[in-house]
């Protein structure tokens, strides 16, 4: 899992820590993760914050342990993918859409040939990001079973 983490731009330590959690039946404390991984507590803490933000791990409380933080891995990868699409990709699409809207307004106000060419390129990007947004909405609003069924139907056509 360390190598997989690197493929997605994460530190190898994140993959190792996720792997430790994935194969545990019960939530694991920060101290226990530190002991099992051999990493510094600050490294483990930073990794857990990032993995939580990516919805790969969840913070849990354990009865009788007070405020001590425990973690468990998300095992349903479709949930992880949907959350990443919903929060990360959608956010990027929103940022680009706003920037393209501003660029379109400025280019429409300009009156030269270069502005006309650039305006057409901006409009092309707007259409592409619009399609991307619709795709994200479909993917985040559907179960993996439904999407698989739709893809199989499309493949037969």
Image (spheres, helix red, strand yellow):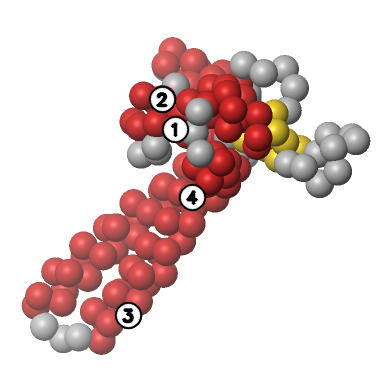
Q: Quarter of the image holding residue 1?
A: top left
Q: Quarter of the image holding residue 57?
A: top right
Label 1 or label 4, whichever comes before in sequence order: 1
Q: Which mark is residue 100?
A: none
Please say if the residues under marks 2 and 1 sit with CB atoms less than 8 Å apart.
yes
Q: Which residue is mark 2?
A: 2
* Res 121 visible: yes
Task: Please state the horizontal and vertical placement of residue 99, each as a whole percent of the image.
Answer: 36, 70
Label 3 or label 1, whichever comes before in sequence order: 1
Task: Please state the horizontal and vertical placement of residue 128, each as a whole percent of the image.
Answer: 34, 51
Which quarter of the image is occupied by the C terminus? top left
Q: Nearer the viewer, mark 2 or mark 4?
A: 2
Q: At numbered mark 1, what does the secondary structure look like: helix, strand or loop?
A: helix
Q: Find the distance from the CA under tag 3 to the CA under tag 1.
A: 46 Å
Q: Which residue is mark 4?
A: 88
Please say if the residues under marks 1 and 4 sit with CB atoms less than 8 Å apart.
no
Residue placed at 36% from the left, 24% from the top?
3
Q: Find the distance from the CA under tag 2 to the CA under tag 1.
A: 7 Å
Label 3 or label 2, whichever comes before in sequence order: 2
Q: Which residue is mark 1?
A: 13
Q: Find the distance from the CA under tag 3 to the CA under tag 4.
A: 26 Å
Residue placed at 38% from the left, 54% from the top?
129
């Amino acid at each position: 899992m360390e190598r997989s983490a690197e493929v997605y731009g994460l530190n190898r330590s994140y993959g190792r820590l996720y792997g430790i959690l994935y194969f545990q039946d019960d939530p694991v404390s920060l101290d226990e993760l530190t002991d099992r991984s051999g990493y510094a507590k600050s490294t483990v803490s930073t990794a857990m914050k990032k993995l939580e933000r990516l919805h790969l791990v969840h913070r849990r409380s354990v009865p009788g342990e007070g405020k001590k933080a425990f973690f468990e891995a998300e095992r349903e990868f479709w949930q992880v993918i949907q959350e990443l699409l919903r929060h990360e990709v959608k956010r990027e699409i929103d940022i680009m859409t706003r920037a393209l809207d501003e660029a379109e307004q400025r280019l429409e106000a300009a009156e030269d040939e270069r502005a006309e060419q650039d305006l057409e390129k901006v409009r092309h990007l707007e259409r592409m990001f619009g399609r991307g947004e619709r795709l994200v909405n479909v993917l985040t609003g559907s179960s993996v079973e439904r999407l698989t069924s739709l893809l199989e139907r499309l493949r037969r056509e």
